[in-house]
Amino acid sequence: MHPQTLSYNAAQAPADQLTCELLAQEIDLALPEAENKLWHAHPVWFLDGNPVVGYSKLKGGVRLLFWSGQSFAAPGLHPEGKFKAAEARFASVDQIDLAALRGWLAECRVVQWDYKNIVRRKGVLERLR
């Protein structure tokens, strides 16, 4: 795990810190080859330079975001924004359904839209997988 992600997690309130730590551990286990870094001030994991999953502290909890989540078959994520992203929000660590999380993480590897080149394509997303 990237040192900046560890610092981000440590800077959260105790309850949110537990949530962030569990999410980071599960993401790292599921995507060991992914590059992890802070992107726009939040921990994000990239596969081949394409953002696939990240989380951020919001008022009232932690938001887990999958950039291609609207295309996942597994239920439980809510659309976010105007592209293909979807999210889950957790007010506490005990709200995380590990089976659902692991399913989403498996899908983020095989269902991807090309966010890496969205600027070059002037806002048009293309499906990678």
Image: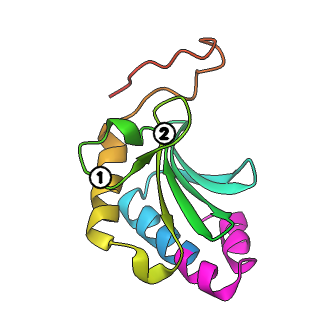
Instruction: Point out residue 7 in the picture as x, y percentages from the top left corner.
Output: 73, 73
Instruction: Point out residue 41 in the picture as x, y percentages from the top left corner.
Output: 75, 54
In the rendered view, does 24 fall on the left or right side of 113?
right
Residue for badge 2 = 85
Label total for image: 2
Instruction: Assess whether residue 5 is covered by the magenta stretch.
Output: yes
In this orientation, which residue lies closer to the viewer: 62 or 35? 62
In the rendered view, does 125 fall on the left or right side of 117?
left
Q: How is the image coloured?
A: rainbow
Question: Which of labels 2 and 1 is toward the front?
Answer: 2
Tell me the chief SS of the magenta region: helix
Instruction: Point out residue 86 in the picture as x, y percentages from the top left corner.
Output: 45, 45
Residue for badge 1 = 106
* Residue 99 in the image: above or below residue 121: below
Q: Amino acid at mark 1?
A: Ala
Furthest residue toward bottom: 14
Residue at mark 2 to residue at mark 1: CA–CA distance = 16 Å
Instruction: Point out residue 98 in the picture as x, y percentages from the top left corner.
Output: 32, 72
Helix or strand or loop: what does disc 2 sit on? loop
How busy is the neighbourhood of tag 2: few (under 14 within 10 Å), some, or many (20 plus)? many
Query: Of callouts 2 and 1, which one flags the residue occurring earlier in the amino acid sequence?
Result: 2
Q: Which mark is residue 52?
A: none
The C terminus lies in quadrant = top left
How busy is the neighbourhood of tag 1: few (under 14 within 10 Å), some, or many (20 plus)? some
* Residue 79 in the image: above or below residue 129: below
Magenta residues span: 1-19
* Residue 67 in the image: above or below residue 119: below
Instruction: Assess whether residue 33 is covered by the magenta stretch.
Output: no
In the rendered view, does 55 fall on the left or right side of 113?
right
In this orientation, which residue lies closer to the viewer: 72 or 78? 78
The N terminus lies in quadrant = bottom right
